[in-house]
Image (spheres, rainbow, N blue to C red):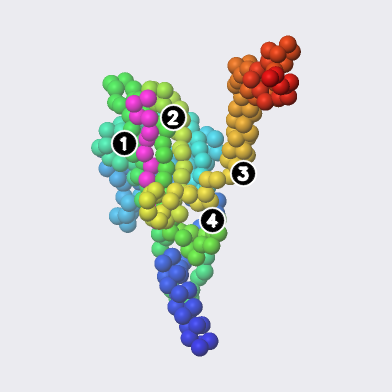
Amino acid sequence: MRLLLVSLWALGLAARVGATDTGGPSHRYAAPLHVECMNRSSETGEHIQNERQEIQWIPFPTCAETDRPLEFHYGVEGSQNCTIPSVSDAFFHLLEFYIHSDAPLSCRLPARPRAQVDILNEPQPAQEYIPLVFALAGTLQLSHLHVSTRMNVLLHTTPKRRIRAHDTGVLDSGVAYSTSTLDESASVKLIIGDPLPLRFSVRWFPTPELPSTDGTVMWQGMGGHVYASTVVYVVLSFLAGAVVAGAWFYGKVLPERLRGRGLGGATPLGAGVGGNGVGNGWGYSKRID
């Protein structure tokens, strides 16, 4: 009987592990993910190949905030700024291709870290990537561009034996797109030599599925969105509401009710002085035959 239970437990564990990624290394929480983009010709928008007839990938332009090419961090959510200090003539023409959708701003992220173990007489496994296309919105003018600089970045992961929210995992897919495309305050007028301030709002999904309210997948990000500050805010809001309601009741409602109610009927006074009672109460009075 004990052997049967152990066998069933092992089968269940194997099934759970099989539902997640188990091959190769995986990203640790907050590990940097360097963004590489397809190198394109500024004249035609066509991708450029290297001497081995492979697509050439180059780092995303350098951000003034970090003095490094754009990078995200595994599982870390929030807003992230990346200001390209000066738009060159070549990059300006590439932006025209990107905005007009003549050529996509095709980038990629490493799905998992490179293997650190060397196997004798065997080549290193090829680095795996996921595509990350930036759908950059804007409008083209004869002398300048209008670029929507606010972008959402949504990244999906495949958990690797994840028990806690910050355990390891592997990238599954991702997408980035401009928001507030009709809001002029969310776009910049751009000419050659101007800086291009990009603002990314990064969110992570713990599974490849989209969040839903009536299914089993709920939007929780990598670590959930219920923090201590949220609880404190709810408690303070409740206390503030209780204080306001109490002040209104004791300062307005209760005095008005007391002023509108006579002393008779609810008082223990009887006939009162001179036989004329203050009210028709149930108090003591002298019997008159």
**4 vs 2, front mark:** 4
Q: Going from the N terminus, do you reach mark 3 or mark 1 first?
A: 1
Q: Going from the N terminus, do you reach mark 1 or mark 4 first?
A: 1
Query: Badge 3 is on which residue?
Result: 228
Q: Which residues are magenta?
A: 172-183
**What is the CA distance from the residue labelled 2 to the residue labelled 3?**
36 Å
Q: Amino acid at mark 3?
A: Ala
The image quarter containing residue 60 is top left
Q: Residue at x 47, y 83 (%)?
A: 7
Query: Badge 4 is on which residue?
Result: 165
Residue 99 vertical placement versus 132 (above, below):
above
Q: Foreground: 25 or 56?
A: 25
**What is the CA distance from the residue labelled 4 to the residue labelled 3?**
16 Å
Q: Amino acid at mark 1?
A: Tyr
Q: Foreground: 63 or 220?
A: 220
Q: Is residue 222 on the magenta stretch? A: no
For the residue labelled by badge 3, is the local secondary structure a helix, a strand or a loop? Answer: helix
Q: Residue at x 52, y 65 (%)?
A: 116
**What is the CA distance from the residue labelled 1 to the residue labelled 4?**
36 Å
The image quarter containing residue 289 is top right
Query: Badge 2 is on which residue?
Result: 196
Q: Going from the N terminus, do you reach mark 2 or mark 3 first?
A: 2
Q: Is residue 110 visible?
A: no
Q: Going from the N terminus, do you reach mark 2 or mark 1 first?
A: 1
Left or right of 264: which side holds 43? left
The image quarter containing residue 239 is top right
Q: Position of residue 187 (x, y in %)?
A: 39, 26
Q: Going from the N terminus, do you reach mark 4 or mark 2 first?
A: 4
Q: Amino acid at mark 2?
A: Leu
- Using the image, tell me which numbered label, if any, was put on residue 98: 1
Left or right of 269: which side holds 151? left
Q: Foreground: 57 or 190?
A: 190
